[in-house]
Structure formats: C-alpha cells, structure tokens
Amino acid sequence: QVQLVESGGGLVQAGGSLRLSCAASGSILSINAMGWYCRAPGKQRELVASITSSGTRNYADSVKGRFTISRDYAKNTVYLQMDSLKPEDTAVYYCNLGQRMGDGHWYISWGQGTQVTVSS
C-alpha cells in the first residue's frame, strides 16, 4: 500500500512563493509518474504539473514559467516550487502517484490534499 504525505501549503500574498512537498512510502514500481493536481472552489480537480520516472515534465499552461516540479528519486519525494503566485492559484493541491502495472494499466494513489491560499 502506497501512502502520500504532503506538506508546505499555507497562506501567502500575491507575488509570493510556496514550496509543496510530497513523500511517497510503500512499494513503488519503477515506471511511474508523480504530480500535483488542484481543485479550486466550484471547479473540478485539474493537473498542475507532473514528472515521470524518466524525468519528463508536464505543466498546465496557467503555471508555465511560474511553477517548477522536481523529484528526489532516492527519497520518492516530489516538490512543487510555486513562484509569482496569483489569487487564482488558490486551491487544494493534491499529490498524485501513478504506477504502471505489469498488465499495462495504471494504479493511481492520492494524497490528502494541502490548502494553498493566495491573497490579493
């Protein structure tokens, strides 16, 4: 069983920065991807950024140039450096781990979520 433990959310003024961390524990397969999703009030959960086990990064258009995702593969930890934050970045941020199983399907795990609030 995989557990994802997030930290680093909080309240920040517009233009400020936050760094989210997510540590994965348990049995993790070699082909995987870790990422961050967010859900703003009244909206569906959507991808913010992801990074695969081979290092390929993907970002939502709204955060390109402002957010940076990185991984410490030895620690099974993913980070999201959030700079130039805007009030519209306010959301609950969820860590995500996808693992490719032997039969080709992906097993998805979620963290509990951490609140990010950006004041104007």
Image (cartoon, rainbow, N blue to C red):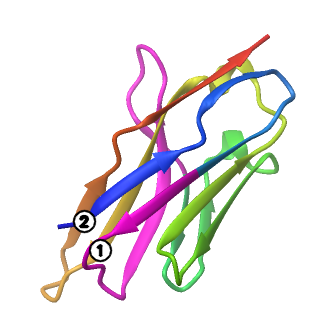
Residue 46 part of the magenta-drawn span? yes
Tag 2–tag 1 contact (CB < 8 Å): yes
User: Looking at the picture, does residue 47 appear above or below residue 17?
Assistant: below
Label disc, if present, on residue 2 of the rendered structure:
2
Q: Residue at x 43, y 71 (%)?
A: 33
**Range drawn in magenta:** 21-48
Q: Residue at x 40, y 35 (%)?
A: 45
Report the residue marked by disc 1: 99
Label 1: how many residues lie within 10 Å, few (<14), some (14-19) or many (20+)?
A: many
What type is the residue that disc 1 sits on? Gln
Q: Provide the secondary structure element on which disc 1 rests.
A: strand
Q: Residue furthest top?
A: 120
Q: Is residue 75 left or right of residue 113?
A: right
Foreground label between 2 and 1? 2
Q: Position of residue 89 (x, y in %)?
A: 65, 28
Q: Provide the secondary structure element on which disc 2 rests.
A: loop
Residue 108 part of the magenta-drawn span? no
